Image: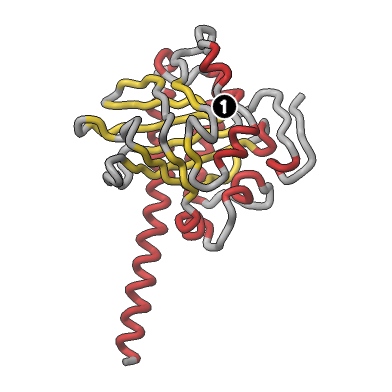
């Protein structure tokens, strides 16, 4: 009986290590997607929009896609700026599902990237089971070096979303998709239970080593945010405004 118990403990321990490695792989793949997209400025997220973004979300296509209830599912990473306009902070993991946008269309794997334009949008994403287009406004984002040609719909949306399928990068609406916080994955990544709000907005939470390459890449492409004020309810501290 003792040997059986020890064997079960060993299996659980190995499973935990494999799952933790999976979270590290998720962060690494998100960094790769960002690097590849930003490598072609004429066909990427406009620099002025990225500089004003409060958060960036990335769902790499390679990660565990499965058909559920007639739709698709992918696992993603959300990274936000400290106080909304400061340095990039610790990442929080989430799942993104839904049948309307399709993470796989005709067998083609698709990367999903979105930017959150304001504190209100970031606040909404931290709730559980957020339906995009209903609980938070979302629109396909403009592509290019600048957002000068953006439409009124794009500029009013709280979230701008993009997809990349076989090298083609374009704005795509995620309306109808459901974003769910992955608290189990976060617990494995950080080694303890933390709410998504604490991870994203609490300055005391330090990013794990596996997240550093992604944070470095975000800092490379957008080192400083625009002049934004984030409410106390979001930042957990006194509002801060960049000069």
Where residue 85 sits, quadrant-wise, is top right
Q: Estimate the x, y position of residue 171 in percent, counting from the top left.
A: 41, 20
Looking at the picture, tell me which residue is in the foreground, 120 or 99.
99
Residue 110 point in image, percent of width and height: 31, 32
* Residue that appears at 52% across and 16% down: 153
Q: Residue at x 73, y 30 (%)?
A: 229
Task: Give above or below for 20 relative to 114.
Answer: below
The residue wearing badge 1 is 158
Name of the residue lying farthest toward the top: 149
State whether residue 170 is above or below residue 95: above
As drawn, which residue projects farthest toward the bottom? Answer: 1
* Residue found at x 53% / y 57%: 190
Q: Residue 241 location, x and y as percent? A: 76, 29
Residue 220 appears in the picture as rendered: no
Q: Quadrant of the N terminus?
A: bottom left
Identity of the residue drawn at 59% across and 54% down: 195
Q: Quadrant of the C terminus?
A: top right
Q: How many marks can you see?
A: 1
Residue at the far left: name it.
106
State the scheme by which the image is colored. Answer: secondary structure
Horizontal arrangement in the rendering, residue 147 relative to residue 109 (left or right)? right
Residue 47: percent from left, percent from top:
53, 18
Foreground pick, 88 / 175? 175
Asked if residue 204 can be seen in this view, the reply is yes
Q: Looking at the rendering, which quadrant does residue 2 occupy?
A: bottom left
Q: Mark 1 Cα within 10 Å, few/some/many (few <14, many 20+)?
A: many
Task: Please indicate whether residue 173 sits to the left or right of residue 219 in the image.
Answer: left
């Amino acid at each position: 009986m003792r040997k059986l118990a020890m064997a079960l403990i060993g299996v659980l321990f190995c499973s935990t290590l494999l799952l933790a490695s999976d979270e590290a792989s998720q962060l690494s793949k998100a960094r790769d997607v960002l690097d590849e997209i930003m490598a072609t400025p004429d066909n990427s997220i406009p620099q002025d929009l990225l500089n004003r973004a409060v958060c960036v979300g990335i769902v790499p296509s390679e990660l565990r896609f499965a058909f559920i209830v007639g739709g698709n599912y992918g696992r993603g990473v959300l990274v936000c700026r400290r106080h909304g306009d400061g340095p990039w902070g610790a990442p929080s993991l989430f799942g993104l599902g839904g049948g309307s946008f399709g993470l796989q269309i005709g067998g083609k794997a698709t990367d999903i990237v979105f930017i959150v334009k304001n504190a209100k949008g970031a606040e909404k994403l931290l709730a559980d089971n957020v339906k995009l287009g209903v609980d938070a406004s979302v629109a396909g984002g403009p592509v290019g070096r600048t957002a000068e040609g953006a439409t009124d719909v794009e500029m009013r949306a709280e979230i701008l979303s993009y997809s990349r399928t076989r090298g083609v990068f374009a704005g795509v609406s995620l309306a109808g998709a459901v974003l769910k916080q992955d608290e189990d994955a976060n617990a494995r990544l950080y080694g303890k239970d933390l709410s998504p709000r604490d991870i994203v907005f609490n300055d005391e939470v330090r990013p794990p080593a596996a997240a550093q390459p992604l944070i470095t890449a975000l800092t490379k492409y957008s080192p400083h945010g625009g002049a934004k004020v984030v409410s106390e309810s979001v930042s957990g501290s006194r509002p801060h405004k960049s000069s």
